[in-house]
Amino acid sequence: MAGYDEGLAAYQKRDWATAIREFRPLAAQGNAAAQARLGHMLFDGLGGTKDDVEALRLLNAAAASGDSFAQHVLGSAYFNGRAVPKDISQALIWFGRAAEKGQPESLHAMGEIHFNGLGINKDEGRGIEYFKRAAEKGWPPSLDRLAQYAWEGRAMPTDQVKALEYARPAAEAGRPVAQFILGVAYLLGQGGVDKDMNKAAQWFRKAADQGHPQSQHNLGVMYLNGNGIAKSQTEGYFWLALGAERAPPNLKQNYEKERDGAGSRLSPADLDATRARVALWKPTALAGQPAAQAGGPSPSSAPLPQQSSTTPPQTTGGKVSSGSGFVVSADGVVMTNAHVVEQCRTITVKPQDAPAQVVSLKAKDSANDMALLKTSLRLPEIAHFRQDRPLRSGDEVVVIGFPLSSLLSREPNVTAGVVSAMNGMRGDPRHYQITAPVQKGNSGGPLIDMSGNIVGIVTSKLNAMKIADKTGDLPQNINFAIKADLARTYLDSNGVAYQTAPSSSQMSVADVGERIKRVTVFIECRID
């Protein structure tokens, strides 16, 4: 280990030449830690020497010896296709091995992959679990993510106090989104802190210096009004112009309008001088990152949700839609329609006899309009699919769901009808045509036979007014459900263990309803 401490100290100070000199003899002797860091430097050309072949040899040797940092860098290489073929499965193997050892970079990488569905099925709940494990080790990018999602109520309950607990260490480490959240909290007096314009301006400035557009805009407004900072029209225009230049699409037009308004109040000389400053301005580098992250690429995250200029989106407002679903596995997987949940920022499910909970999207098939939700529900019983005899035209069926929840109660509604045709619209063989009445909000709910077994998923209804407009006749109760065979194939393809049962007994509509209500859930989708 002679020279290792000197090499590590130089590596952490980014004195690459000294680090390479100290690590080379140790790497040649088989020191895995030295091999990992020397491989990283050669891989990224740190210190002026770039050698992918030698870097991969060293990284593979160190990773095989169990060095978690080498495993992380290899995972990044396979994820990004750097010097090796892009291979998500290999990336997951190496990230997973490093994550098992508590490597925070890999825990965060696994969080990004699962949360955003980067090459695999999206699973926000699992992504949050990885972010929390990395946050426990103080990893700033994960603390930053959790601050954002706790503030917004995305994939976890809205909790502004908890959001600030995550945000403070992330902001101190230089993460601009966390700094923005703290700025908003002090600006509005939210998250358990008092209004403090001076602190708000300080946090917005830290994020603005790194190029965060919403913080640049807010800082500009504070300069124009003299809130928490010395009033200055030129500084206000400067930061508004930078924010407008980098603004996300949903904010760009408003930012440009405010910039132009501020510019109209400057003299031509001041305007020209400030525009020259804008053209020369460059963001500062992200502060507080360890040397290990300087060159070891991690999965690039999906774009951040577009935030308002003043405050991140709140779950107390915005557009809300609803639908129905039913629990299909012992570990709480809920089945519904893809169109019920595919635009959601936050998904909440509420069973009949349990509290509501925020859940994550496990899988989605837009082509066949099916989706699976991952929940922590552990109900006494789950839905059973019809095991035997196929349905026939004229067979009685029951629909259970939550139609028109904004007008009616959120008690599961039970309606009955028959299978009127074995194919759907224009002869679509994936669907049944049914007469059981359905309304907006029934989508995703179960279609049940008279033995209480699932035979389909309610998906749509005929637009009666459009048909009446074209034909002069108002059609009655022409609705459609996805056949259970297609639903079971989808569950099989996603590894979900469901149950079947024979359809031998004949129950009343009331008894079927009473039984299936217990496994049917109300789904609320918050879109923005």
Image: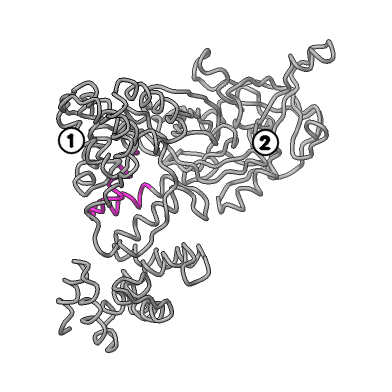
Q: Which residues are magenta?
A: 128-149
Q: Is residue 141 magenta?
A: yes
Query: Is 91 or 376 nearer to us in this picture?
Result: 91
Query: Which mark identifies residue 202?
Result: 1
Q: Provide the secondary structure element on which disc 1 rests.
A: helix
Q: Is residue 296 above or below residue 442?
A: below
Q: Is residue 459 above or below residue 91?
A: above
Q: Is residue 314 above or below residue 242?
A: above
Are there few (<14), some (14-19), or many (20+) residues within 10 Å of tag 2?
Answer: many
Quadrant of res 440: top right
Circles 1, 2 touching at the beta carbon (< 8 Å) = no
Query: Is 92 or 436 nearer to us in this picture?
Result: 92
Q: Position of residue 154 (x, y in %)?
A: 39, 36
Residue at point 27%, 39% (across, down): 208
Of all residues, the one furthest to the top in this rendering is 472
Three-letter amino acid code of the residue under disc 1: Gln
Q: Is residue 350 magenta?
A: no
Q: Is residue 35 above or below residue 267?
A: below
> Of tags 1 and 2, which is closer to the observer?
1
Residue at point 65%, 46% (across, down): 488
| Residue on which the image places disc 2 | 456
Task: Locate residue 65 relative to residue 331 in the image: left or right.
Answer: left
* Magenta stretch: helix, strand or loop mostly: helix
Q: Position of residue 88 (x, y in %)?
A: 50, 62
Of all residues, the one furthest to the front in this rendering is 269
Query: Is 229 or 389 nearer to us in this picture?
Result: 229
How far apart are the alpha carbons under marks 1 and 2?
57 Å
